[in-house]
Image (cartoon, rainbow, N blue to C red):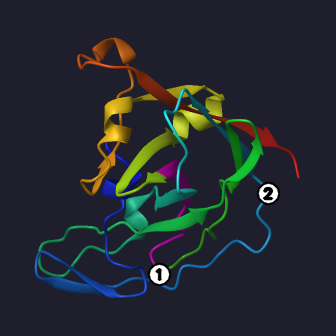
Amino acid sequence: MISLRTTAAIAALSLPFTAYGATMTQPDIKQNPNPKMRYEITATIDGAPGPFDRIHGIVDYRVTNELCVPPTPVMGARIVPEKRAELEFHHDHGNVYRATVYLDLLQDEDYFGKGTCHWALMAAGIELDHATVTFSASLFHDDLLAGNAVPRYFAEASYAKAQANRVDTGIADRTQFHGAGSLFSITMKAEERKP
């Protein structure tokens, strides 16, 4: 599974960007002034071998109807806008953290003069920093809407060997872990909250 950090390694949306030799400018993406589709995300950390220096989150949005985006002049590729936002997790109790996301955080609008672009939340994630290692777990769109509890498993040895700067995205199926030692998990789940 690809981490949110990897999937969103793109240029800032306020800057021009290049695809196949053609430069285009990203639109001025607007935030919805009255978002209503609110979900609470719960992250439960189970069996971690020690504390974390920082716990924070990220949420990625993407335009879902690419025909609202003009093709690039040279190759005709459509560069679909994406946007990343910070997600603030608050300690609830014990090993449980919570954050609030809005599915409709960004404004659907005709940004390019080719029809209304519709935004959707692609994934929300939590990142737990320990020394130079970031443990990253994500909850993707379908699981978020379905209210599925999604665990991610990490080797305790990865926590212990924190001298190498890296992102650890763990594994989804603990039976696929073939290393020595124990595992800890981060389980994410979302629940809709009416305004």
- Extreme-right residue of the structure: 195
What residue is at 61 percent from the left and 68 percent from the top? Answer: 108
The one nearer the camera, 180 or 13, is 180
What residue is at 35 percent from the left and 39 percent from the top? Answer: 160
The one nearer the camera, 195 or 74, is 195
Amino acid found under the numbered disc labelled 2: Lys
- Residue 121 position, x and y percent, is 55, 53
What residue is at 38 percent from the left and 63 percent from the top? Answer: 67
What residue is at 54 percent from the left and 26 percent from the top? Answer: 47
For marks 1 and 2, give the CA distance: 26 Å
Query: What residue is shown with label 2?
Result: 36
Tell me: 140 left or right of 188.
left
Q: Dot 2: what SS?
A: loop
Q: Dot 1: what SS?
A: loop
Amino acid found under the numbered disc labelled 1: Gly
Query: What residue is shown with label 1?
Result: 113
Q: Is residue 119 above or below residue 149?
A: below
